Amino acid sequence: MARLNFFYNTDTCQYEPIKVKKKEVILNSLGLLSVSLILALIITVIFNTYFDTPTEALLKKENKTLSFHLASLAETYDDAATMMKVLKQRDTQLYTEIYDVEPNANSLVPESPLAYLKEDILQPHAYKKEVIGNFGHEVENILLQTEKSNSKLKEIFDIANKKIGDLEFIPTIQPVSNPDQSALVSGFGMRINPFHHGNIMHEGIDFSAPRGTPVYATATGTVNFIKKSEANTGFGNQVKIEHGNGFETKYTHLQEIIIKEGQEVKKGEIIGHVGSTGGIIAPAVHYELIQNGKKIDPVNYMIEGLVEAEYVKLLELALQKNQSLD
Amino acid sequence: MAKIKFTYNTETCRYEPVILKPKHVMSNIAGFLGVSLMIALGITYAYHSYFTPVKETRLLVENHDIKAQWDLLDHNITSLTDEIKQLEIRDDNIYRTILDVEPIASTVRQAGVGGSDPFQDINTSDTRESEMVLNTYKVLDKLKKQMYIQTRSYDDLEKILDEKQRMWNSKPAIYPLNYKDIRRTGSGFGWRSHPIFKRLKFHSGLDISAAHGKPIYATGDGIITTTRYSKSYGNVVYIDHDFGYETRYAHMSAFTVKEGQTVKRGDVIGYIGSTGWSTSPHVHYELVHNGKHIDPVPYLNKNLSEEELEKIIEASNEHDLVMDY
């Protein structure tokens, strides 16, 4: 048992035990606590300055390593970005020298809207599925309505088909496969001649394609003219097809012709292969459309198999006032 | 003054004043400090267990920042990769098609991917993100190689284009006279009755009549190989256009060029005359391809308008001025 402490009370002239007051206990405890807090703070500061916790040590190391690699990679990236600028300039320069027009700054290569469809809609990512799921009900409704309009449209198309007659005899396709439209390099109208650089009438469309690419009949018809020429000027090896309704098409600069005069050809049938016979600077087909003896712009008919955006792209390319290939 | 403390001594049965010995004072202070220290350690421990210390937070923020920058770098690299891909597509699909050269094989384009790992020396043991670090190195390295290949490709294409342009510019492609000066395009290529000998003779060129002294132009870029007088041709100029083409211009009244001189399409090489076996002022224009005379008519580009022909001639004059000074 603790010794009792007394004090001498001068009023009562007696020794009385000292009573420990609550207030004093609290004050004492608070003192103790504040000293403890100050100590805790000092400990933390010292510890932080001279030691690291394992997590901190790991982070420190990682930050240092990552910063080092980031700086080195960023430097390499800067070099690459500078190089890319040079490459783009050279690309523009080449394009300009070949076509006599600047390339479209917005799109280096005409993008196929179909590619977009495939990636973004036909193969939805997980989150898109979720979004689509939410709209499921609405989609169902729309589908129902679409089905209704579809049958209506089918009726209209049936009537239209009867009126128009067979599209087979109208040259609505392109003479070479042209999935991203970029094969069309020069359109109908005044164009710069690649040899003497004079501005002259270019009465057809040039489709550039690698040597040997198949050339298709753009509509069903009869081959009514074939001419082969070794000369390095003019149209070289050429084919003309008569389609009826006053339409004729002409395919020139072919490497070889695999049909005969008088032969019937179907729309899309291969008539020959791309070459550079005659006066042309690159392997290409110079394609002409003749209506009632007059040469007209074939792009106006090249609608088959194209969605609107693709056709717009084709039209833009055809309207460029650039250099023709022949 | 502080009250004096007393204690009741049971042995002496007396109240005795408490004397504070230094030893007691010391042990009291030590005890107090000891308890404080224990509490302080407790507080520190609790703080570390329940809260993230400031220093760690700071490091975490820094770590986060670095990773955000890393993401940005990755993003930028991806857009460069997309751009180079577009350039590659254009290179293969447009330039190489137009310039009639094989596209670059995709195995070459993917240059040196695979094989020994060139990144094994990179030390990433200090980070939990070693995959991220190595991946960025690899992607950037591949990008640089692709760009290098693209650079080489442009070098090649520019060379090819230069040569092709030289070929296009050299090919005889215009009339040797200005349209307004032409009086008559006479005897063509083939078997013709000769105006002087009055018998069928092979006519190896095209006769174009014009007034005496009208200028005659080079029909394509080339080098003057011959300027001479011959009994039959009179004053004649030969131009070698390379690529197998040669043109000859006969019966001139005078030349303006010397042998060995380079000429551009549209340059004046001489003037209309009637020298040699000729009955009236005209130019006898011959086109030789790979040593054989061919009909020059298909090479004249008759659909070229007068203004356009004049532009070509003028452009060549400008060039001459530059070359002379």
Image: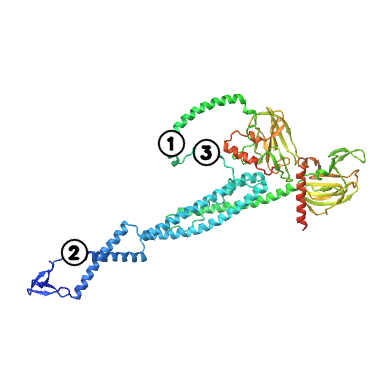
Whichever of labels 1 and 2 marks the residue nearer the N terminus, that label is 2
Which type of secondary structure does the marked residue at label 1 adopt? loop
For this orientation, the residue located farthest to the left is B13
Which quarter of the picture shows residue B44? bottom left
> Do we see residue B321 in this rendering?
yes
Quickly name the residue at label 2: A23
Percent of width and height locating residue A75: 53, 58
Percent of width and height locating residue B141: 53, 54
Left or right placement of residue A282 versus residue A308 in this view: right
Which of A44 and B309 lies nearest the eye of the viewer? B309
Q: Mark 3 or mark 1, which is nearer to you? A: 1
Quickly name the residue at label 3: A117
Residue A268, relative to residue A193: is it above or below? above
Which type of secondary structure does the marked residue at label 3 adopt? helix
Subunit ID for the residue under disc 1: A
Q: Amino acid at mark 3?
A: Leu
Dot 2 alpha-carbon crowd within 10 angstroms: few under 14, some 14 to 19, many 20 or more: few
Q: Amino acid at mark 1?
A: Phe
Which numbered dot is residue A135?
1
Whichever of labels 2 and 3 marks the residue nearer the N terminus, that label is 2
For this orientation, the residue located farthest to the right is B197
